[in-house]
Amino acid sequence: MAGPPPAICRGTAERPGLGRFLLSLICGVVAVAATMAATMPAGRAFDQDAPVPLTPEFIRFFDKLALTEDYGPFNNRPPWVRKWAGPVKVVLDERAETLRAEIEDLLARITRWTDLPFTVMPPGASAVPDAWNVINVKLLSRVTFQRLYKTRDVVCQTETHGLGGLLQVGYMVLSEGFTDCLKHEFMHALGFDSHWYPKTRSEIRSVLAYRDSSARADDYSPWDIMAIRILYDRRIRAGMNREKSLSIAHEVIRGRPQSAALPVQAASGSAFR
Ligand SMILES: [Zn+2]
């Protein structure tokens, strides 16, 4: 190939109560994921193992989170599939070491849904510039975060960069005291750039709903898990266009219509491997 293609910059944003906003940073539009102070109502609890009918609304949910633009005219992200391939290294900065056990548990769950191996690098490992397949996790004091991002209410942020939809590097920055945004941020990091903010009444709960929404889930909901499984279905490729990937999403759901919460079958023919 004659010279490297231009990099794509992407990010994800959440600002509870205020909806979407943009923040120009680094090499393009970076959207910021935020969770608000404890005054915000927590996500509604529900039975994660309850059967979940995959209604047409679920396709809209998947489409919204994985394939559609969310952040307005300054964001040039194409509506294509964004996902990781191959093993992903997760590098924690010194402060983020306090989150190691939680992150390792979280990634073990995500591996079950994606078949994507994650390795949380040993303490002291530093992020190698230009390394691919790396997610860097940084924990900042609240004051430092506010100063760095010139914000009072944004508390966590994730941005991902890649080529042709294939994710190569992720940057996750959390504020101390607000590490409950980890599940939300890791779902962004997987390639779900958007948020869930249903305009009408919806049964679907998600960690990617805004914190002040009744649709917010504290943990990955069955719909989240199903969406993750679909995005990481082998038939759906990084960079695949929206139409094609939605068509495959329908196929996946037809093969598993009863529940998003069912465990992955051991059979090698599972669509969710
Ligand atoms: Zn977010």
Image (spheres, rainbow, N blue to C red):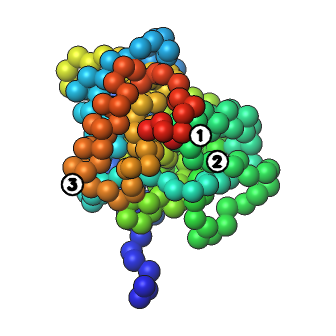
Query: Mark 2 against mark 3, which lies toward the viewer?
Result: 2
Of mark 2 and mark 3, the one earlier in the sequence is 3
Residue pushed farthest right? 123
Q: Dot 3, crowdedness within 10 Å: few (<14), some or many (≥20)?
A: few
For badge 1, the amino acid type reads Thr
Q: CA distance from mark 2 to mark 3?
A: 34 Å
| Residue drawn where x is 53% and y is 25% of the image | 263
Residue on which disc 1 sits: 111
The quarter of the displayed image where residue 178 is located: top right
The quarter of the displayed image where residue 251 is located: top left
Left or right: 118 as drawn, with respect to 146: right
Of residues 84 and 271, the one drawn nearer to the viewer in this rendering? 271
| Residue drawn where x is 45% and y is 18% of the image | 43
| Residue drawn where x is 49% and y is 16% of the image | 48
Left or right: 146 as drawn, with respect to 216: right
For badge 3, the amino acid type reads Pro
Q: CA distance from mark 3 to mark 1?
A: 34 Å
Q: Is residue 69 visible?
A: no
For the image shown, how many numbered marks are present on the structure? 3
Residue on which disc 2 sits: 118
| Residue drawn where x is 59% and y is 40% of the image | 111
- Image coords of residue 144 (percent x, y): 60, 47
| C-beta proximity under 8 Å, tags 2 and 3 | no
Of mark 3 and mark 1, the one earlier in the sequence is 3
Residue on which disc 3 sits: 73
